[in-house]
Image (cartoon, rainbow, N blue to C red):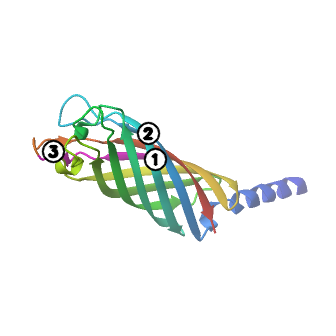
Amino acid sequence: MKKIILTVFAATSLLLYSTPSFALVSVSVGIPMSQTITGKEGGKSYGNAPDKTSGYFLGVSFLSFGLGIDSYTTKFKSGSCNGCWDTRSEGVLKTNMTNLFYQFPVPVVNLIIGLGMGTTEYDCKTADGKGCSANYDKGSATQWYTSIGMPLIPLFDIHLSYRSITSKNIKNKVTELKDDNSGSVTGIGLAFNF
């Protein structure tokens, strides 16, 4: 009986020691791994084809509530950027988000759910040298996201994140049509709990 009590006490102490609910402050840093765009350009049946994504995700939480910033760019495959106007040009989609999130006090894993809003815009070179801003307005975007982290040691974890983005209104100034760059972004990151 004594062994059972000691085993239960040791296991409970280990689980509760690594529980994120004991962290007063948590700082997380991440990078996007890939982006998928399921929306369409100008209401047509084709869409932008993402190639490489780079940038960062930052988050700071106090107790269980936090604020975050996402800033990343997604390069399009050659010729797929409607805003490029030139198949030789390389265009990118810039995304900037501000997030509010909640970290659930769950033992063993760090579970985060959040909402964000921000902007998306095309950035590219055009034949006339003016860039995409001459042809496209900046659009607004919203997202919900989740992150699941596994503590490696009590004050440090590695986490995977998934963001579902709605961005349907980058407007073409000439045709008045709006491009839909909605989709998803996956990422990986590290969190430090103090």
Dot label at residue 54: 1
How far apart, in angstroms, are the residues tagged by discs 3 and 2? 24 Å
Say above or below: 77 vs 94: above
- Please state if 112 lies on the left or on the right of 100 as rendered: right
Q: Nearer the viewer, residue 95 or 150?
A: 95
- In the rendered image, the quadrant that contains the N terminus is bottom right
- The type of residue carrying mark 1 is Ser
Q: Position of residue 151 (x, y in %)?
A: 66, 54
Q: Residues within 10 Å of mark 1 (few under 14, many from 20)?
A: some
Residue sitting farthest toward the left: 175
Tell me whether the residue at label 2 lies in contact with that at label 1, contact meaning CB atoms closer than 8 angstroms: yes
Q: Residue at x 51, y 67 (%)?
A: 61
Name the spot of residue 31 as percent of width and height, x first: 51, 50
* Residue furthest out toward the top: 45
Residues drawn in magenta:
163-173
Helix, strand, or loop for circle 3?
loop
Q: Are marks 1 and 3 in contact (CB under 8 Å)?
A: no
Judge from the rendering whether residue 107 lies leftward or rightward of residue 58; answer left or right. Answer: right
Amino acid carrying label 2: it is Lys
- Horizontal side, residue 139 vs residue 161: left or right: left
Give me the C-alpha separation between circle 1 and circle 3.
Answer: 25 Å
> Is disc 2 surrounded by few (<14), some (14 to 19) or many (20+) residues within 10 Å?
some
Tag 2 or tag 3, which sits nearer the N-term?
2
Judge by depth and name the residue closer to the eye, 130 or 184: 130
